[in-house]
Image (cartoon, helix red, strand yellow):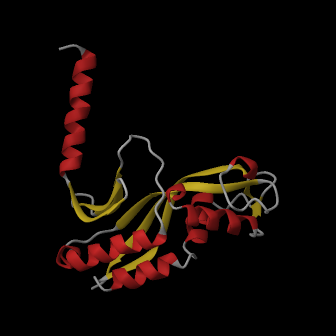
Amino acid sequence: MNVKYFLILAFSLLGSALLGQEQALSIIKSGENTFKITADLKWQTLRIRVDTPEIGQTISINQNLLLNLIDSLLTEHEALLKKENFESFFMGRVVEFPWLKEYLIRHAASSAEWDANKGRLKKDHLQINKWVARLLFQHPLFKKMAKRFKTAGYAVSGLSVEKVLVADLSKIKTQNKNLKQGKYPFDAQLWVLLEKQN
């Protein structure tokens, strides 16, 4: 067996094993796309997955669809949620939620802590991941989410983000074109942090 074939086989088996650990819990079909919330019982994580007709297709998830997915999850799988101890809900990339992306850009632009000319925080001791997480957590979505998860015995304790992307406003697809020109955060990987309540 050559090395290339062995690596392909190894990664295929690994991928199958990882997928086998996930259960699709909440499913909503919208147009040609199928939106799911899946559960990884090994890592105690919930996440959004989207099946699309074409690989690499750009996805946009509106707030109502997201909340409907969560409502379906809590209604149909309350027993599982109470049995397990889920620690996070991975939403994916901020750009997949255009309304959340717009919120991030707009509030970064109005923040006294953000330097739009340099595209960075003004104070070096502030960490951009934590700063973006704190800013996004102020969006009304997460109060609605917290109210829902509370019914299943979970508190939404905050957000965690990684890989924040910053770009010049002129190069970002946004409705916030009337803002001061400069560089702003517009994307990141986003987790909602969950805490099981006794």
Q: Nearer the viewer, residue 184 or 37?
A: 37
x and y percent of residue 198 in the render? 27, 85
Q: Which residue is outermost to the front?
A: 31
- Picture layout, residue 155 above or below residue 120: below
The residue sitting at 79% across, 51% down in the picture is 118
The residue sitting at 27% across, 73% down in the picture is 73
The residue sitting at 41% across, 69% down in the picture is 66
Looking at the image, residue 177 sits to the left or right of residue 150; the answer is: right
- Picture layout, residue 138 above or below residue 173: below
Q: Nearer the viewer, residue 63 or 154?
A: 63
x and y percent of residue 127 in the render? 62, 59
Q: Quadrant of residue 146?
A: bottom left
x and y percent of residue 55 in the render? 39, 40
Looking at the image, residue 18 sits to the left or right of residue 135; the answer is: left
Q: Is residue 113 visible?
A: no
Q: Which residue is outermost to the top?
A: 2
Q: Quadrant of residue 106?
A: bottom right
Q: Quadrant of residue 177?
A: bottom right
- Picture layout, residue 45 above or below residue 14: below
The residue sitting at 46% across, 53% down in the picture is 59
